[in-house]
Image (tube, rainbow, N blue to C red):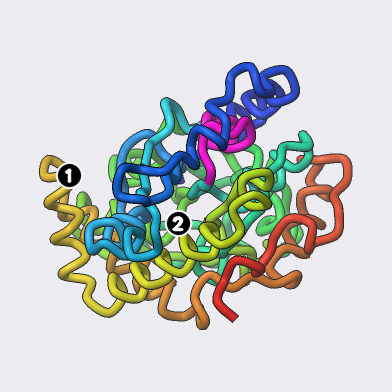
Amino acid sequence: MRRHIQTIVAALLALATLGAATACSSDDASQQTADGLTKVNMVMEWPVADAFWIPFLVAKDKGFYREGGIDLTITPPPTVADTMKILGTSQADVAFTTTLDVLFARDQEAPVIATGSYGGSNNWGLIAKAPFDLGQIKGKTVGIYNDAWSKAQLSMMLNSVGLKLSDVQLVTAADDTVPLLLQNKVDVITGVTNAESSEVRATGGFDPFFMPARDHGAPNTPIFVVAGNTEWLDKNRDKARAFMSATIKGLNDAVTDPTGALAVYKKLYPSDDMGFVTDAWQTTVKILKEQQPPLVQSDQQWEGLLKAAVAQGLVKSTGAPNSYWTNDYLSK
């Protein structure tokens, strides 16, 4: 997955000094439109649209946010490092981001919290052209991204069979591990089922073998979450609930009618590679269908991540699991 966590951490370190000086305050974001809607700003996880955005796009396109009294603006960040900086400094009210980004942001005392889990499991792992045994990976080449969490999860997988990172040869990809695999430059790559695996199918024309990290020592923590700025949430509790309700309505609609959801995406982003987007969305639908009810979180989802983050040296310490998430804005 194309996530550069070291860059994200560097950006989060700026939160303490940015403060209100750089923030477009939540008061500005909550101004009323001429037709009485509340403006809500949402920042996404990636600088360009991807299939993960579809539930939000469908909810907006079909008027679900407007029905909840919300005029939603969906904004990509300038870089992947900016999402939590923008949310933490109140330049956005809500965000689509990663679970680990919330952890890092809270470690820097940013006013953010996860309000919904996008899926209920960890779909990161190792991807190869053919099945292999993890115990036989010693000496093999592994295509990986240069971020702390990818290395941490790979380390946990290797530890589960008595190996360590130095037992494999890491080949770092700048932004995409898939070409390394397709060009036979590595034996396996790291990635997720609805990004790298989808790209292999769309570009390489075959269904790759996937070995889930969650079955080999890594925590079964969902990758993505919906998050909110706690200051905005506290001031706009009813609108926050309306936002989450509309999001769930959009998610259910998109999962029930995946073809229609893809049509919405294509209408908004006609130049995108719809082969890749279609595969990524179809795979995402399977992930979202497994989580019932949608977006609900639990301590159990977070506990493994928090323990692993400390054990792998990503953070020195963590708070209680329920300090990182809330279900308060979901329908009872």
Q: Residue at x 20, y 54 (%)?
A: 265
**Drawn side of residue 208 relative to residue 228, left or right:** left
Q: For residue 109: magenta?
A: no
Q: Nearest the camera: 1 or 300?
A: 300
Q: Residue at x 85, y 49 (%)?
A: 318
State the residue position of label 2.
Answer: 192
Q: Nearest the camera: 310 or 33?
A: 33
Q: Quadrant of residue 2?
A: top left
Give the magenta-colored segment's residue range.
Answer: 81-93
Q: Position of residue 40 (x, y in %)?
A: 44, 45
**Drawn side of residue 213 relative to residue 300, left or right:** left
Q: Earlier in the sequence, mark 2 or mark 1?
A: 2
Which quarter shows the C terminus? bottom right
Q: Residue at x 36, y 60 (%)?
A: 65
Crowding near pointer 2: few (<14 within 10 Å), some, many (20+)? many
Q: Is residue 82 visible?
A: yes
Q: Residue at x 82, y 57 (%)?
A: 307
State the residue position of label 1.
Answer: 269
Crowding near pointer 1: few (<14 within 10 Å), some, many (20+)? some
From what the image shows, is residue 300 above or below residue 15?
below
* Residue type (three-letter) at the residue carrying disc 2: Val
Label 2: state its secondary structure: strand
From what the image shows, is residue 191 above or below residue 250?
above
Q: Position of residue 291 (x, y in %)?
A: 50, 78
